[in-house]
Image (tube, rainbow, N blue to C red):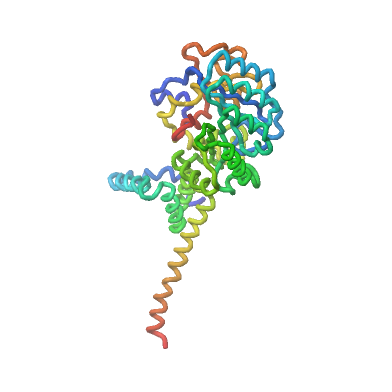
Amino acid sequence: MDAATFAETLAAHGLPPLCKGTPDTLQVNVGYLCNRACRHCHLEAGPARTERMSRVVMDEVVALARRAPFALADVTGGAPEMNPDIGHLLRELAALTPRRIFRTNLVALEGREELLGLLTSGGWGIGASLPAVNAGQVDGVRGDGVFERSLNMLRRLNALGYGQGQGLELHLVSNPGGAFLPPSQAAATKTFRRALDLQGIVFNSLMTFANVPLGRFRSWLEASGNLEDYEASLRQRFNPQVVCGLMCRNILSVGWDGRLYDCDFNQALGLASATAEHISDYQSHSPPDEVAIPVGEHCFACTAGSGFT
Amino acid sequence: MTYYDPKDLAKFGDIGKNAPEAAKKFFAYYEEVFAEGALTAREKALIALAVAHAVQCPYCIDAYTGTCLEKGSNADEMTEAVHVAAAIRGGATLVHGVQMRNILDKKAF
């Protein structure tokens, strides 16, 4: 017998189909170019990718943030540092959204003093991915020597005032280094704090997320013979309690070409948002009632355990 | 053909089919043992992994390798746990040499 789909699983738990709420987060993916090619990347970002947000689309993003207020701007990639117009976007958005997060893999910030200055002066928080606090695990995901380089960048960010309780937020993001679910956020936070404290590094919070079986991670799951068991483990851990807080309800995810999605994972699959096809079509936060969010097998990654909110 | 099939692990609960009360008590006890307590769930999983190797249970090794990863342990910690099991097993063998020596001392000139 085939396993229940995500939509069927919601219904079996007495939950309605996922529908869009009022977006409070503007997520901007400025392109898939990245200086790493991590095995867990659902977007298959890497050095060979050419998709890149143009300044024209960036200006449309800024115009949207001006006409429809968002509480949070979340700039991501690929490695957003590698978009040559990133400074333009950061400068313009800084005045339009009260809270701002810039995602980084840390090593892409190396040698980018001007950009670091822009992030600091613009009050941009940092969302830094750090898979683990163990050199073997980090280097296994990211490449040899990346762990030490990541620690050095975290020390640099601390020196700039990040994570020190002075308003510059430094959040860490950890994904498991393989076909298994992450530890609880509370337990992982203790481990990270203890290990990074020994390195003289402080941070505001740690978020642990399950790897989503899409893109390069899915290819690896298939090649390593882990796909079936991994998808089954996500289904088994379905937690109906986290459904109401799923990020897709309140996020507007803008792709590098201005297309709109309900989350970064739907972007990876090309599952367009039903609110509007393109950023230029999105006029205000008054979506029609009951706009459904496209869902699929990958959604089980966001509802497993403590979820992906 | 092998006596051990990883898929059989999912049938563990079936062991209660002919002795439901005993199984119910065992699984309740098992759940209580592995709950967060004076030891964290992560530490308990590492102990379980070491014991699984000592008793050489392939089901337990499979289950607790996954559990250790999901509780946030890394390969270094897990490998050290297996060495602890090996040291105790090896030590237990060797320390029984004391029995041998006692008998030797009694029986041999």
Instruction: Give whichever of A70, A244 is nearer the camera.
Output: A70
Which residue is drawn at the image coordinates 59% and 37% (left, top)? Answer: A160
| Quadrant where the C terminus of chain B is found in the figure | bottom left
Tell me where residue A182 appears, x and y as whole percent: 49, 40
Tell me where residue B66 appears, x and y as whole percent: 49, 45
* Above or below A21: residue B84: below
Is residue A2 visible in the rendered structure shown here?
no
Tell me where residue B8 appears, x and y as whole percent: 45, 45
Determine which quarter of the picture holds residue A43: top right
Which residue is drawn at the image coordinates 41% and 75% (left, top)? Answer: B98
* Above or below B90: residue A182: above
Instruction: Determine whether, in the image, residue A259 is placed left or right of residue A166.
Output: right
Residue with the most extreme left position? B21
Instruction: Determine whether, in the image, residue B16 is placed left or right of residue A32.
Output: left
Instruction: Give whichever of A98, B22 is nearer the camera.
Output: A98
Instruction: Give whichever of B85, A76 is nearer the camera.
Output: A76
Tell me where residue A81 appears, x and y as whole percent: 66, 31
Determine which quarter of the picture holds residue A157: top right
Report the number of numbered marks: 0
Is residue A93 visible in the rendered structure shown here?
yes
Instruction: Give whichever of A44, B89 is nearer the camera.
Output: A44
* Above or below B22: residue A169: above
Instruction: Determine whether, in the image, residue A264 is placed left or right of residue A33.
Output: left
